[in-house]
Image (tube, helix red, strand yellow):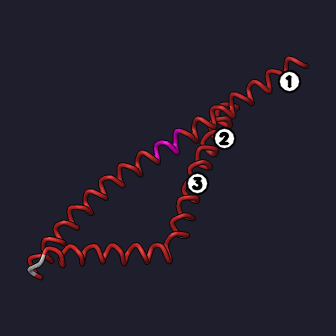
Amino acid sequence: MIDFIKEYFDKRIQLVKLESIGVLANVSSGLVHAMLLLVIGLFTLLMFSLALGFWLSDLLESKAYGFAIVGGIYTFFFIIYFLFGESSVDRLVKDKMVKLALDVEEDNEETINASEN
């Protein structure tokens, strides 16, 4: 009986380790994916910002005014985000992380149920 209990706890510890590895793998994969999208998005935004700055510079015949307007646009977006969007983004990220963790847990339960049958 003691051997059975000992074996049960060993199996349970292995299961917790495997579940933790699964969650960590999904979170890491999601972070790498998000970072790649962020880098690509930032380069795209940089190119369009430069294009807009130069276009406004030609239109206004002043490089300082053209790029100042682009900077003003970004400042406006920053203020709007700071006032209204910070909590929404925070909630979205937390929901996504919980969903990833629960998806891994559901996959593990399906695997366990399939192996028992």
**Percent x, y of residue 87:** 55, 69
Q: Is residue 3 left or right of residue 66?
A: right
Separation of marks 2 and 3 at Cα, in angstroms: 15 Å
Badges 2 and 1: C-beta atoms under 8 Å apart? Answer: no
Outermost residue toward the front? Answer: 64
Q: Which residue is mark 2?
A: 109
In this rendered view, identify the residue nearer to me: 117 or 53.
Answer: 53
Q: Nearer the viewer, residue 74 or 107?
A: 74
Q: Which residue is mark 1?
A: 5
Query: What percent of the width, then of the height, locates residue 71?
Result: 28, 73
**Earlier along the polypeptide chain: callout 2 or callout 3?**
3
Residue stretch in magenta: 25-30
Circle number at residue 83: none
Q: Residue furthest top?
A: 3
Q: Amino acid at mark 2?
A: Glu
Query: Going 85% across and 24% down the picture, which residue do you hit?
Result: 5
Decide if residue 27 is on the left or right side of residue 36. right
**Picture layout, residue 11 above or below residue 56:** above
